[in-house]
Amino acid sequence: MTRRPANTVNVACVLPGSAHPRLTVCVAAVSALLFLLPPLAATAEFRFSMPEFSTDYEHEPMFLPPAALTPPRLDITLLAALLGFTAYVVLRRRSRRWVLTLSFVALAYFGFYRQGCVCSVGSLQNVLNAYVGTGEILPLVVAVFFLLPLIAALYFGRVFCASVCPLGAAQEICAVHPVQVPKPVDAALGMLAYAYLGIAVMGIVMDCGFLICRYDPFVGFFRRGGSFNMLLAGGIILTTGIFIARPYCRYFCPYGVLLRWISIFSRYHAAITPGECVQCRLCEEACPYNAIIPPEPGAAPESRHAGAMRLGKLLAVSPLVVLCAAGIGWSAHPTLSRMHPTVRLAERIAAEEAGRVPDTTIETDAFREGDQTAASLYAEARALDARFKYAGAALGVFLGLAVCARLFRLSVLRHARDYTIDKGACLSCARCFKYCPVEAPEKP
């Protein structure tokens, strides 16, 4: 039987995006150490004793977070304290140095000590599972980790992303030579996060499991163990993040989509400069997230009639875009349904019975030892496949609406004299502060 694979800065002499050579070497060394260390570490204990097999089957190693040595209220207190302190150093002290310091604290505690659990990004699944999934009771600490960063974003912007999230902190520390991704490419890649959010919601609704936790690229580093593919994915993201700042946060994080929506309405948000903008463009060049909006020319680039006509055309074509997206989602049900273990098992059983695969798996052997017949399994899989048609159509509608909303936002021309911040895209990283010639010197 085979086994199934499972600081004061002189603006005149420092260019945006530059970094000290020693810092680059240190970050590269830390990234390499994180990538190489996990396979050498011991695995965690199983929560339940593993079943005994009469064959030579060996179970896959599991990397589970150990029992917490600190009470949940300490985690909640530290989360609230880091959110509040980050808001203070971003809005009041305007200190990039302090933001990085807090990033190291969050990475050390929530990342390596707590091993990525509880995670605000993954808590999205627990909340959905409590209300639209299996109905399991939502633990208080998980609910707080889900809501507190969103509340902070409503008041202060994405301060959670700035230095509190361990996933973002690891990438921010590695982003030593970031370059700006062209805005059209950046906007297009940003839609991947919406797709990930929609698929994660579908996974909960259709009882496919917690996909965000299953494919977390950094949990292997935090728990010092994991599959080779996930460790490789995390290593690629960290290496890419040296030049493309925070690729996971910007293009994949489903929780970041919610933070982006709420941060747009934030009451207090970081401004580029506390004084009059001299339009030196240094902040625009320093921001690797395309979160700084340049001023529009004094003269209106187009008439109101032209702008109204463009918006009217977008309104007219939006239903067609949503309808096409729904059709694509409907037709993608064979692929989407494979997220469910029952569908995958039925396909494997059918392949084994047809002789398309020579060996069996532990799942198919366990199925044949049970009471369910292959016919009933196939019928269950067909019923699930039919449900995934509607789920895929709903996913397509969501993505179609997201694309239309992004097009509407890009089509609206803003008239401003100074550089302003895109509240949704800004991660409150404080990079732009130290390049502003109007900014007061950063206090130690």
Image: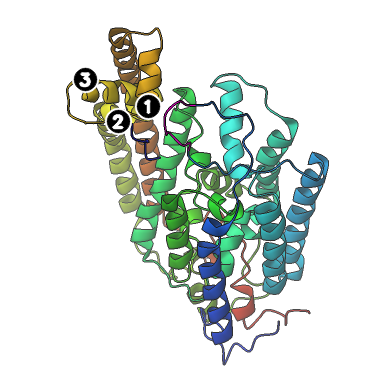
Query: In the image, residue 64 lies at what x, y percent?
Result: 61, 42
Q: Are marks 3 and 2 in contact (CB under 8 Å)?
A: no
Where disc 1 sits, the SS reads helix
The residue where tag 3 is placed is 353
Which quadrant of the figure contains the N terminus? top left
Q: In this view, does 219 lie to the left or right of 76?
A: left
Q: Position of residue 25 (x, y in %)?
A: 54, 80
Depth check: 244 or 324 in front?
244
Q: According to the image, label 1 marks what residue?
A: 394
Is 344 above or below relative to 227? above
Q: Residue 337, how many percent across, how many down?
A: 33, 26
Q: How far apart are marks 3 and 2 (CA)?
A: 30 Å
| Residue 393 visible in the displayed image | no
Of the image marks 1 and 3, the number of the one nearer the N terminus:
3
Query: Split into 4 quadrants, where in the image is the C terminus?
Result: bottom right
| Kind of residue indicated by mark 2 | Gly
Q: Quadrant of residue 22?
A: bottom right
